[in-house]
Amino acid sequence: MKNEIFKQIKQLIIVIISGVCSYFIPIAHFFVNIPDTKILTGFDIAIFSFIGNSLFSAIDYFYKKNKLIIRIYIEAIEQESDKLILYDKDIDKQLEIKANIKIEGKKRKCPLISLKAPDCYLLQVQNNKSSSFVKEISTSEEYEIDINKILQKSPKEGISITREIKFILLLEEHNKGNNDYLVCEKESGWKCLGMTNIDSKRLQLLQK
């Protein structure tokens, strides 16, 4: 939805600029021999719109080519969604969740990503190949994912890496009807000038 609105705004700006350019810099009469000024103005707007769209597309292409995009989505494995519903029977039961990580673009230095569990939950990483990129910060509550380690052996450009890190989540206290979230947060104070984009989706923890 946000992308669609941005596209419409971009198109409106291009049309306005094209209209202004066609008024001050008419060029259609160099290509077509038509006396009607309205038709010539229409051609001018079409020409400048084409130039504007081509310019925007070129800038967008080079921007994305030099950008690093990191997507981290946390999901409940059993329920296969971004919402984990817990009942009375789930107290002290080990529930599997996973962090799906997708990295694309150009290699850049990245901030550390922390994965935090609410107070009444315990979080434990499962040992596998991908867990080597994970460090425990606060006992069974917070973990740090080092994207730079994942990118250590990757090429400088054209990166396309997928990793899956599994965790065990344990509900210790039952706060009935309580809404909590298992969240991903990037390192505070990190400045990337828009060239490193981190898109994360948290896991909703809903107690019934």
Image (cartoon, grey):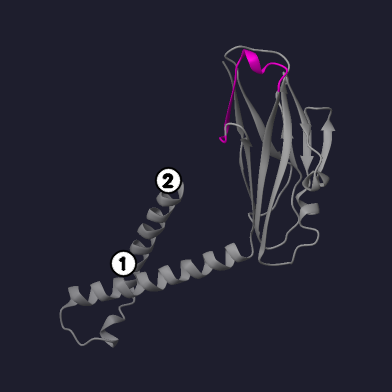
Q: Which residue is mark 1?
A: 19
Please state the extent of the stretch shown in magenta in the rendering. Answer: 80-93
> In which quadrant will I find the C terminus?
top right
> In which quadrant will I find the N terminus?
top left
Q: Residue at x 41, y 51 (%)?
A: 4
**1 or 2: tag closer to the N-terminus:** 2
Task: Indicate the position of residue 186 as horizontal and vertical percent values.
Answer: 71, 41
Residue type marked 2: Met
Q: Residue at x 24, y 72 (%)?
A: 42
Task: Indicate the position of residue 44 as horizontal and vertical percent values.
Answer: 29, 75
Residue type marked 1: Gly
Q: Element under label 2?
A: loop
Is 181 situated above or below 68? above
Task: Indicate the position of residue 14 as horizontal and vertical percent values.
Answer: 38, 63
Is 157 situated above or below 3? below
Q: Closer to the observer: label 1 or label 2?
A: 2
Image position of 182 (left or right of 111): left
Residue in the foreground of this view, choosing between 19 and 175: 175
Q: Element under label 1?
A: helix
Residue 26, quarter of picture: bottom left
- Asked whether 31 falls inside the magenta stretch, the response is no
Q: Residue at x 64, y 64 (%)?
A: 66
Q: Which residue is mark 2?
A: 1
Residue 177, quarter of picture: top right
Circles 1 and 2, Cβ within 8 Å, touching? The answer is no
Residue in the foreground of this view, choosing between 115 and 173: 173
Say which mark, if any, is on residue 29. none
Task: Indicate the position of residue 49 as horizontal and vertical percent values.
Answer: 35, 69
Q: Residue at x 34, y 62 (%)?
A: 16
